[in-house]
Amino acid sequence: MARIIVITSGKGGVGKTTTAAALSMGLAQRGKRTVVIDFDVGLRNLDLIMGCERRVVYDFINVINGEANLNQALIRDKRCDSLYVLPASQTRDKDALTREGVERVLTDLGDNYDFIVCDSPAGIEHGAYMAMYFADDAIVVTNPEVSSVRDSDRMLGILSSRSKRAEENLDPIREYLLLTRYDPMRVANGEMLSVDDVQEILSLKLLGVVPESRAVLNASNAGIPVILDRESDAGQAYGDMVSRYLGDDVPHRFLHPEKKGLLSRIFKG
Amino acid sequence: MGLLDYFVSSRPKTAGNASVAKERLQILVAHDRVARDKPSYLPQLQQEILAVIRKYVEVDMDAVSVTYEQEESHEVLELNIILPESASASSA
């Protein structure tokens, strides 16, 4: 049975889809059979970030409604054989995402995959509920900024009370914090909440810290998950995140500003 | 310029306001969490208790506070009513 991971946050624009793309690619590259599902019905974006937008024929809602079968809707990633993308519908009504339908698709996928990554829409409405309801693990993507931290805390409340695991009194969802758009220089200057500050408030297991990086926009421009940009800080941070998720003990990087040498300081002007 | 910068930047920097953000968040999140764990009937319960009390004693609308705490084996519902100073004299 596949493990279901939801990428969630409450707040929009914090990096959920970037993270879903990176995590699913990272798991697949390590040989795990992985499918990543876009739950953002009406505003689908995952296919763009994954670079497969021109190969979408059928979508998640088509499968739920029985208009296509899973094999017709799943898009195999061209860079990695064990990764598949299930895109969201761009036109349908959000109500088409029924709990029974979602459950049926997840159950069917569960036999053939190791991991199912659910990319949640922003907000705390229907789509976000459906994305987290069946989850085993949750990665809460948070920016070091007040509204994002608060929304993450609210989402944690929802995970612990409104998920299937909560309603059926099963073991709770395993919750992880991923701090993104982290700027170590601004943290050092006292302008930005530090990773310790955020952890003190949310008290979650820290899965990773992804620095603010030009590589993220470059990757999304090209439709290449940023984890494939191994030269970049963000790509490496996501690589570390995947290793930690799979149980490796990897030290955190990119927490402190790069130290400038004396010479570069003197001659920078 | 560069040499000057080096000495200038070694002085303590002006403190940013991340600490303000942290304090505000701690208060906000604590408040959110208290509200989250309360049963949904609590506001109405508070209204109805207040209505009953006001039948007998003239108390302010905000004179009743209901707190709810969840402990490991039991829940505590605490009701705190502030009677006006003259209440005991006039109602006796």
Image (cartoon, coloured by chain):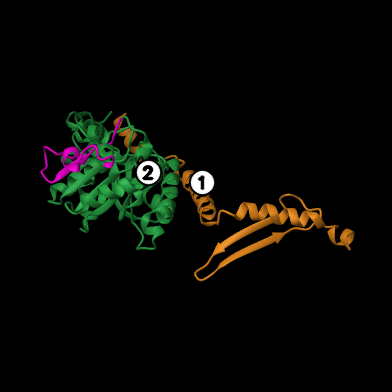
Q: Residue at x 71, y 50 (%)?
A: B62
Q: Is residue B31 left or right of residue A196?
A: right
User: Residue A25 appears at what percent x and percent y?
Assistant: 18, 44
Magenta region, residue range: A64-90
Query: In the rendered structure, are the residues bearing label 1 and label 2 in contact, judged by CB atoms less than 8 Å apart?
Result: no
- Tag 1 residue: B24
**Amino acid type at mark 2:** Ala
Report the Cα–Cα distance between label 1 and label 2: 27 Å
Q: What chain does badge 2 belong to?
A: A
Report the front residue among B31 and A42: A42
User: Residue A196 appears at what percent x and percent y?
Assistant: 38, 52
Between circles 1 and 2, the one closer to the viewer is: 2
- Compared to residue A13, the image places residue B27 above or below, namely below
User: Residue A11 appears at what percent x and percent y?
Assistant: 40, 40
**Amino acid type at mark 1:** Arg
- In the image, farthest residue toward the front: A66
Task: Tell me the crowding category of disc 1: few under 14, some 14 to 19, or many 20 or more residues within 10 angstroms, Cα based.
Answer: few
- Tag 2 residue: A128
The chain in orange: B
Q: Residue at x 43, y 49 (%)?
A: A153
Q: Chain A is drawn in which colour?
A: green
Quarter assignment of residue A91: top left
Q: Report if residue A70 lies within the magenta region.
A: yes
Q: Which residue is drawn at 10% across and 43% down?
A: A81
Quarter assignment of residue A24: top left
